[in-house]
Image (tube, rainbow, N blue to C red):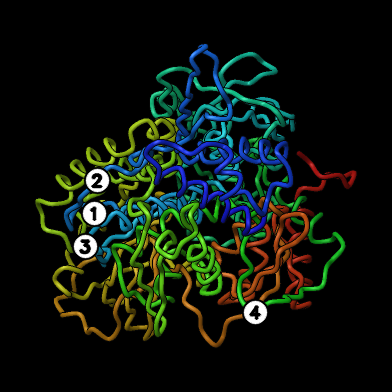
Amino acid sequence: MSASRTERLLNLLLALLNTKVGLPRAVLREKVYKDSAENDVAFGRMFERDKVDLKQFGFEIETIVDRSSFGNDDPGTTRYRIGKDSNRLPEVVLTPAESTVLLLAAQLWERAALGTAAASAVRKLQAAGGFTDVDLPAGVQPRIKPAGQAFDDVVAAMHGRHTVRFGYLAGSTGREEQREVEPWGLGSRFGQWYLVGWDRARGAKRFFRLSRMTTAVTAVPGSSCEPPAGFNARAELDELNELPLRQATLEVDRDRLLALRRRALAAQEPAMGSPARDRVVVEFRDPEQLAEELASYGPRVLVQGPADLRAAVVRRLQAALDFHTSPAVAPTFPDAGRAPRARKRTSEDQLARMLQLVPFLVHHQGLHIQEVADRFGISRRQLIDDLKILICSGLPGGYPDDLLDIQWEDDHVYISEHLDLNRPVKFSEDEAAALLTGLAMLGDLPQLAGMPEDQPGSALESVTIKLTGAAGKAGRLAGSVSGQSVAPEQSQSFATITQAIRDSQQLHLRYLSLQKDEITERDVDPLRLYSLDNTWYFEAYCHSAAGIRNFRLDRVESLAANGRAASHTATAGQDFPARLFTPSDDDVLVALKLTRQGAGLADDYYAERTAQRPDGGLLAEVRFGNAGWVPMFISQHGGAVRVLAPEAVHTETGTWLQAALSQYESASGSVAG
């Protein structure tokens, strides 16, 4: 949609906000629609559409009807206005501690629709002047990575109250089926994200694991639905029973895969007929979850049973090989850097940003234009385009004093006339859900490093109360999203590292290195703790490697202070979230092709360049510290990603996949499932 439509919507809003008695249709057509509507019919259609659009922002247009002496309505004298307090964000004033907790909650949502909504909500609080600019505590930075594109698509459908359609791998039958579901809520349990909704074909409530969705989630055209009154995703997910504990029998290459062997139930035995392998038994609950790990080990492990786990591994490997041998595309990147994920931008998006931009500038006079652009996550050019529309917008009179007055002198932005747009609009449903659900997820987090002992709990409680009140009816969607706890399972290691960060002390640790497949010993200066879902890491300066490294808490064999002060050779990076991968000159740069469902991997692995594909997928250039990791990566994400270049890595990956699958071939040459 064109910028002229954005300008028209903004001018209509300003006109209706700044009138006490209301404006008749004739004035609106002459002053607001003069360059848009060719005749009365076109004007009528546009005005009705624009009223609907403004209502989506919560601006209810009041209709004032003058009645003649005969008691009949006269359309010519009907007037329209919007109350000045219509849909304005209530005043919310946060203490520094509350602002810190809120910022942590907002930044939990890594690269997801709710992450965008949370950032927008924080900007509204900043624009209203009630948010204290704070830095995140260096010690603890949790974050959540929801289940890829399916999560975003379901959130959008719930927000729009649309029925969704998707392919689904049924756990009971192992067959792919088409499902049509009224989405009621999303939540995380047992390390997996679930959709709760009404299955239209079965006429019953069902739970759907997002990782089992085999196609894109699409809204059913013309559909609408409502969750049951009082629906609460957390309460619904409490009905789910954890899958029963089962045992998997595996053949594992001798002296390899220590991470897997650590979980073995008993001493390993030599595999029958395979002198170079051991028989290993591990416990598991979710075959799909374990299959993802086992597929990544490729030919180094063979699943003997149970059958559903074996089939799940084979399916991943076969999908990876099928994608590997599909027609290749040239890995070309027309633009330097990362291409934005495809999403249709509308004038509603632009107007929403402007309704935040004006009050933000009112409360942050004189900021550098690039800093303003960075705060809104847009380019300098996009911001200037917004400002150009704003300075041409105003009241129907069109006089200089009737226009928004914004200047940017020496690249510093000032606003002297805001025309009653000095307060941002209320939280949308997804904005309220992002903040309130994020705050709930912080509830089990231990003491935040860098904050006084008595502040996190009380600040969490008080900011939740304030935001619940400010959200009002928009908090509806918050009850439809239930996140997982971000509390670390390795509580003792967490406490030891947190204390060492506070006291600036070194730590000695014994650590299982997955890359080297061995236990290593190191002295490190801990810098910060951070999580990805319920897996916790700590960033540290490693004296053995003479550089910053990242360590998973669940791979730490032992951890204790070594009695020495931290060297302060390095400090925690300023980036958020912390990166799991530290680039070096020895990295291998690999060109990848990702499907639409796998496109999020470009973000997960810090792609340096990306290019959008017509089908919604991506081309991406990703650094790997070791080329040997690439086949494992491709196998793990069976069918979501393939190697395009270098050719040697592509060939090695194909050989790896063929070798892994050949283990499962029966005497007839078919793949056993």
- The disc labelled 1 sits on which kind of residue? Gly
Instruction: Provide the secondary structure element on which disc 4 rests.
Output: loop
Toward which corner of the image does residue 224 lie, by quadrant?
A: top right
Residue, disc 3? 498
Left or right of 615 in this view: 188: left
Q: Are marks 2 and 1 in contact (CB under 8 Å)?
A: yes
The disc labelled 2 sits on which kind of residue? Glu
Residue 117 versus residue 530 in the image, above or below = above
Q: Earlier in the sequence, mark 2 or mark 3?
A: 2
Circle 3: residue type:
Thr
Residue furthest to the right in view is: 668
Question: Residue 205 versus residue 256: which sits nearer the camera?
Answer: 205
Q: First in sequence, mark 1 or 4: give its number.
A: 1
465 is higher (above) or lower (below) than 623: above
The residues bearing labels 4 and 2 have C-alpha atoms spaced at a distance of 42 Å
Point out the tag, 4 or 2, that comes first from the N-terminus: 2
What amino acid is labelled 4 in the image?
A: Ala
Identify the residue shown where x is 56% and y is 23%: 74
Residue occupying image coordinates x 73% and y 68%: 643
Q: Residues within 10 Å of mark 1 (few under 14, many from 20)?
A: some
**Rendered-image quadrant of the C terminus:** top right
Where disc 3 sits, the SS reads helix
Q: Which mark is residue 336?
A: 4
